[in-house]
Amino acid sequence: MTIDVWMQHPTARFLASEFLASLRRWTGGQIPEGELPIESTLESMDVAGVDIGLLSAWRGPHGQDLVSNDEVAEWVRRHPTRFAGLAAVDLDRPMTAVRELRRRVRDEGFVGLRVVPWLWGAPPTDRRYYPLFAECVELGVPFCTQVGHTGPLRPSETGRPIPYIDEIALDFPELTIVCGHVGYPWTEEMVAVCRKHENVYIDTSAYTSRRLPKELVTFMKTGTGARKVLFGTNYPMIGHAHALDGLDELELPESSCSAYLHDNAARVFAKIGNLAA
């Protein structure tokens, strides 16, 4: 069984976003242009043998509801054995954000919170995040975020693992933090922070197997790294089959490969429950 911990089913609003322009250049126009049925996302998963996908909502400042929590909830409702939801919230309204996260997790079964710092122009040490971190701990769900440079034409500073991830892990040692996009060009920093903090993890979204940084692959072959790295795609920017192509070339031990593709995600996102069994 394989679990994709970072993907989104793109709405027309999401696909029309100006920040996708640079990603379209990188992918040679592979990112779709128009509205897609949810079945197309399931087809991408099926071709690659991906059983479960964590669908993320996308919320930014000034009402940028690019993929709404309601839309994610509906896709999960329609395909409850294939999808689980990651909530997005409005950082500018902290108490509304806390209540939204609480409702989505408790009432609708969402399994975590995702905030993309570059979309807000605010690193995770910004004070607006801190009530959400406390609520994640109380709810028993991870905080998911982006690390590394910013592919879209936005400043990359918000994606530095040091100081930002290191500092929030010190302030909230009980908070599970899943850092997507491997942290490049600060991958060594990301690995160091992951080694240092018990509840910090890395997901490989936005990178194909053949493009994973050597530092990360080396880490995945260690005892600590084998239980700390989770598979992700960033679909639809990278299709599932493309993301997994070349996995055998990494020469991961069988137990490490199983942990990477399934076991770590099932443990970290415990609220997936029976889906990941």
Image (cartoon, rainbow, N blue to C red):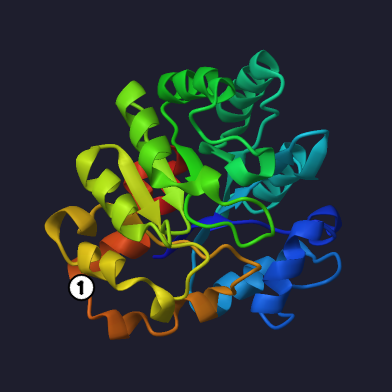
> Mark 1 belongs to which amino acid?
Glu
On the image, the x and y values in percent for residue 110 come to 57, 36
Mark 1 packing: few (<14 Cα in 10 Å), some, or many (20+)? few
Q: Nearer the viewer, residue 165 or 230?
A: 165
Looking at the rendered image, the quarter that the N terminus falls into is: bottom left
- Please give the name of the residue rendered at 62% of the width and 48% of the height, measured from the top-left corner: 56
Residue at coordinates 48% horizontally, 29% vertically from top-left? 125
Q: Is residue 79 left or right of residue 132?
A: right
Q: Position of residue 135 (x, y in %)?
A: 49, 20
Relative vertical location of residue 122 with respect to residue 184 in this rendering, above or below: above
**Is residue 169 shown left or right of residue 118?**
left
Q: Quadrant of residue 9?
A: bottom right
Q: Secondary structure at mark 1?
A: helix
Q: Nearer the viewer, residue 173 or 158?
A: 158
206 sits left or right of 35 in the view: left
| Labels in figure, total | 1
What is the quadrant of residue 141 in the picture? top left
Given the current orientation, which residue lies at the most extreme top position? Answer: 95
Say above or below: 79 vs 216: above
Residue closest to the far left: 223
Is residue 277 visible in the rendered image? The answer is no
Judge left or right: residue 194 versus residue 78. Answer: left
* Residue at (41, 59) in percent of width and height: 182
Q: Position of residue 176 (x, y in %)?
A: 37, 35
Q: Quadrant of residue 93?
A: top right
Residue 256 percent location from the top left of the image: 22, 65
- On the image, numbered disc 1 is attached to which residue? 254
Q: Residue at x 63, y 29 (%)?
A: 104
Please indicate, yes or no, whether residue 145 appears anywhere in the rendered image.
yes
